[in-house]
């Protein structure tokens, strides 16, 4: 248990030491997204499912920031530890793989949640300025559920990929070729109802659609997909990636690059 | 008797069995001893250490730490072991004290400040405790690695080339420290290719080459078995001496190379040096380096690239 707490504390301390990269940068990017897409472009977009484009965008950007930062936190921690060699310390010390996975993915969740909260606050301020009302959270427990699921799942994906990775390139390849397209096509910026039926069907195969819409339901009460379907798919994702992360720690490499 | 470390017929193969790094090695580390595992680079020393710490899985054979197989109950065995890796670890985010605090946590110790400060003092790192690893000199980094290995007061210490790239004074300080740890009851496995270090420190040594043990035993006994005694006789004036042991003559200095089992009395009787002419006699015992070179060339092994 002490091993778990120590790794968790270490992971939190690590991202706080590079706070410009881990918290300030996401703050600036969500500020810009909201300003350009939400406020400027959003005024020309028609309201969808009874919500303004700006408020539609806020949960999408929150989930995007959450997913990216959760993934970044665990993967860059593991990879930089591989680079400096101290990942071997974790293998040599009496710590179980479960402790490592939980500690790292919980720390990922913490960083992701901070970024999501910042995005929410910035978005709510823009909305207040534009529409004169504060963005209230429609279903707090649903919101919490999807935040926790997304943070842990992407923390575990980050762990899995980082343990297999043998170069930094492989990590950025995952971000650029898989994570980024899936987030952009997963309904962050638009409702899939606006798509051609063929692309709607394709989008439904994108697991991120369910996390993004689950959170949108939690905050706004509107969603492109059934919230129960979204919850079940998230839980399946959680189970799958927990197993993948365990497998990666067992078979992947702790060794120095 | 429960031994701190017992390795039996350990094999480790890579690349689907085509490359065998360790070929059936067996040895033990006894309670309170310093055991030296010696060999040229690439002999398999680090692979053996890695199987003890479970970084690598043996292909066959077993590794037991205090009677427990490291593959069966790794959490128990890892708690008994402290390990100093060969390569310096340069964690970039934290300072010396933070690193040691986290490392204590990995071993289940929440409030370990007292021990950490003791080690920092002992290893002359106390005034550097708020520095990042990259701000430390090479020697300080080594000492930090040793402090890390000792935060949980292990019963078995694995030192993988602890003095590689360390200057002579610091090396001697580290030797004294290692002896101190042993005197406190710690059992120590040391790998090194500095034979002087092994001769100075180790009670017993195992000499390994290309993955096999070529000799195992008491350090002094190995030196005695594989080296010759050098006797240098200095005379007051030149004198013709006849002996099968006579190796070279430089001026009034006569160098004899004599088997270890021949006593000085026997030697003097055989060579029959006129006592009145003897100015001085120097006797040089063989060293581990000589024994090592003999063993390695005797088996006609080469160092792999």
Image: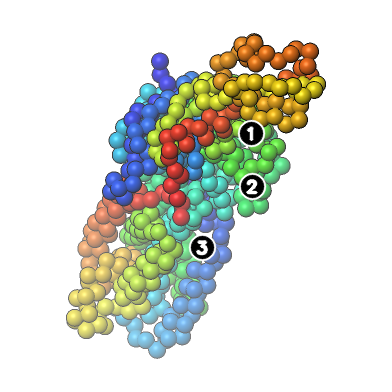
Mark 2 Cα shell of 10 Å, populated few (<14), some (14-19), many (≥20): some
Circles 3, 2 touching at the beta carbon (< 8 Å): no
Q: Is residue B182 left or right of residue A214?
A: right
Identify the disc placed on residue B174. 1
Is residue B50 visible in the rendered image? The answer is no
Badge 2 marks a residue whose secondary structure is helix
Distance from label 2 to label 1 (Cα)?
14 Å
Up-down relation of residue A257 to residue B32 (above or below) = below
Percent from the top left, x then y, of residue B163? Answer: 60, 39
Badge 1 marks a residue whose secondary structure is helix
Q: Are marks 2 and 1 on the same chain?
A: yes
> Which chain contains the residue that carries disc 2?
B
The count of marks equals: 3
Q: Nearer the viewer, residue B220 or A217?
A: B220
Circles 1, 3 touching at the beta carbon (< 8 Å): no
Percent from the top left, x then y, of residue A139? Answer: 34, 62
Identify the disc placed on residue A22. 3
Up-down relation of residue B105 to residue A238 (above or below) = above
Q: Are marks 3 and 2 on the same chain?
A: no
Up-down relation of residue A170 to residue A163 (above or below) = below
Name the quadrant containing residue A238: bottom left
> Residue shown at 45%/68% (left/top)?
A120
Percent from the top left, x then y, of residue B23? Answer: 35, 37
> Which chain contains the residue that carries disc 3?
A
> Residue shown at 57%/19% (left/top)?
B260
Q: Which residue is mark 2?
A: B138
**What colouring style does the render use?**
rainbow
Q: Nearer the viewer, residue B224 or A199?
A: B224
- Of badges 3 and 2, the one in the foreground is 2
């Amino acid at each position: 248990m002490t091993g778990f707490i120590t790794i968790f504390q270490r992971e939190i301390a690590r991202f706080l030491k590079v706070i410009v990269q881990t918290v300030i940068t996401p703050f600036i990017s969500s500020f810009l997204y909201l300003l350009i897409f939400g406020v400027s472009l959003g005024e020309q977009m028609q309201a969808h499912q009874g919500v303004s484009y700006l408020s539609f965008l806020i949960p999408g950007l929150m989930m995007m920031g959450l997913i990216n930062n959760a993934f970044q936190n665990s993967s860059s921690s593991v990879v930089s530890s591989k680079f400096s060699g101290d990942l071997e310390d974790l293998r040599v010390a009496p710590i179980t793989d479960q402790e490592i996975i939980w500690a790292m993915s919980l720390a990922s969740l913490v960083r992701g949640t901070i970024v999501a909260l910042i995005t929410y606050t910035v978005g709510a301020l823009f909305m207040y300025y534009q529409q004169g009302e504060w963005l209230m959270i429609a279903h707090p427990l649903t919101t919490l559920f999807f935040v926790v699921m997304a943070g842990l799942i992407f923390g575990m994906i980050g762990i899995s990929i980082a343990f297999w990775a043998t170069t930094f390139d492989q990590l950025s390849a995952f971000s650029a070729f898989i994570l980024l397209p899936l987030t952009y096509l997963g309904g962050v910026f638009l409702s899939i109802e606006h798509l051609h039926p063929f692309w709607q069907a394709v989008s439904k195969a994108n697991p991120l659609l369910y996390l993004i819409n689950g959170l949108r339901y939690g905050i706004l009460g509107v969603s492109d997909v059934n919230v129960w379907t979204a919850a079940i798919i998230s839980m399946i994702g959680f189970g799958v990636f927990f197993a993948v992360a365990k497998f990666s720690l067992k078979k992947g490499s702790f060794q120095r690059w | 008797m429960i031994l701190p470390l017992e390795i039996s017929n350990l094999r480790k193969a890579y690349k689907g069995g085509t490359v065998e790094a360790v070929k059936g090695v067996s040895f033990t580390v006894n309670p309170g001893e310093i055991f030296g595992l010696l060999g040229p680079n690439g002999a398999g020393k680090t692979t053996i250490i890695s199987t003890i710490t479970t970084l690598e899985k043996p292909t066959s054979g077993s590794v037991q730490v205090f009677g427990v197989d490291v593959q069966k109950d790794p959490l128990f065995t890892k708690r008994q072991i402290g390990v100093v890796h060969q390569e310096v670890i340069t964690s970039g985010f934290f300072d010396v004290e933070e690193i040691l605090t986290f490392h204590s946590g990995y071993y289940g110790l929440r409030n370990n400040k007292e021990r950490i400060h003791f080690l920092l003092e002992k290893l002359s790192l106390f005034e550097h405790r708020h520095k990042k690893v990259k701000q430390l000199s090479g020697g300080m980094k080594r000492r930090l690695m040793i402090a890390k290995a000792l935060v949980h007061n292990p019963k078995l210490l694995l030192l993988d080339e602890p003095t590689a790239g360390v200057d002579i004074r610091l090396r001697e300080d580290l030797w004294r420290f290692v002896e101190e740890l042993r005197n406190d009851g710690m059992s120590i496995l040391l790998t090194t290719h500095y034979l002087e270090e092994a001769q100075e420190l180790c009670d017993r040594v195992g000499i390994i080459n290309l993955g096999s043990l070529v000799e195992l035993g008491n350090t002094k006994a190995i030196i005695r078995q594989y080296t010759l005694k050098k006797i240098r006789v200095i005379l007051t004036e030149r004198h013709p001496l006849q002996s099968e042991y006579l190796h070279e003559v430089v001026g009034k200095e006569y160098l004899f190379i004599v088997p270890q089992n021949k006593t000085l009395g026997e030697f003097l009787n055989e060579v029959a040096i006129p006592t009145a002419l003897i100015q001085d006699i120097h006797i040089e015992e063989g060293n581990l380096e000589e024994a090592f070179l003999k063993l390695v060339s005797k088996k006609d092994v080469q160092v792999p690239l």
